[in-house]
Image (tube, rainbow, N blue to C red):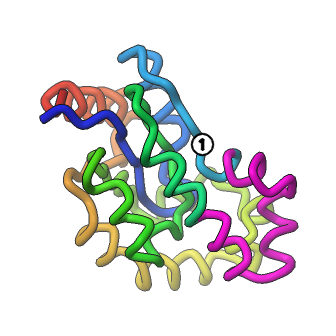
Amino acid sequence: MGKNVVLLIGMPGCGKTTIGLEASKKLGYDFYDMDRFVEEISNSTVKELFSISEDYFRDYESRACRELSSLKGKTIISSGGGVIKRKANIDCFKENGIIIFIDRPVEEILKDVDLDSRPLLKDGKDRLYNLYNERYELYNIYCDYKVINKYTLEYAIDKVVDIIKTCE
């Protein structure tokens, strides 16, 4: 297939960053956390960007998608949970990459995510359920592959590694 870039999508707290980082180590790929990349290009924190407006943050996120999707080296990118809110973001990755949905049940996310540290989740667990209901179908529509993350972390990492190997 020859796709260089792997984009991990899914809910906040589903494991995208942890899985992406570990899979990149196993494969010798570069790794980018899209939220950290947004902070670098904006010289602001995600929280500061959201304090201006969600659209303001999403504009930087879209810029990050354009830049990260055009990378030439083998790269795994952990996206923000809302990257699927703009189809153009996904379109950036379709030509040069594969998209893997890290599907973790909300109940599992709630067990170990600090809701206060996530701008969109600061209103509590009901907000997480609302986001899940709003986004779940889009994650499924836009992904090329889906990995269920409700077993062990190693299981999910190995599944992502296996998918990437079959696409090389």
Mark 1 sits on what residue? Answer: 33
Count of all numbered marks drawn on residues in the image: 1
Q: Position of residue 53 (x, y in %)?
A: 77, 83
Vertical relation: 41 (above or below) 128: above
The stretch drawn in magenta includes residue 41: yes
Q: Residue at x 82, y 65 (%)?
A: 47
Q: Amino acid at mark 1?
A: Asp
Q: Quadrant of the C terminus?
A: top left
Mark 1 crowd level (few <14, some 14–19, many ≥20, 10 Å Cα): some
Q: Residue at x 54, y 49 (%)?
A: 67
Of residue 143 and residue 74, the one placed in the foreground of this image is 74
Q: Residue at x 67, y 46 (%)?
A: 37
**Overall secondary structure of the magenta stretch?**
helix
Of residue 114 and residue 119, the one placed in the foreground of this image is 119
Q: Which residues are magenta?
A: 37-61
| Element carrying mark 1 | strand
Q: Position of residue 123 (x, y in %)?
A: 74, 81
- Locate residue 120: give its quadrant: bottom right
Vertical relation: 82 (above or below) 94: below
- Locate residue 151: give its quadrant: top left
Of residue 165 and residue 133, the one placed in the foreground of this image is 165
Q: Position of residue 88 (x, y in %)?
A: 41, 72
- Locate residue 157: give its quadrant: top left
Q: Residue at x 60, y 42 (%)?
A: 33
Q: Is residue 67 visible?
A: yes
Does residue 130 appear left or right of residue 113 in this picture? Answer: left
The stretch drawn in magenta includes residue 30: no
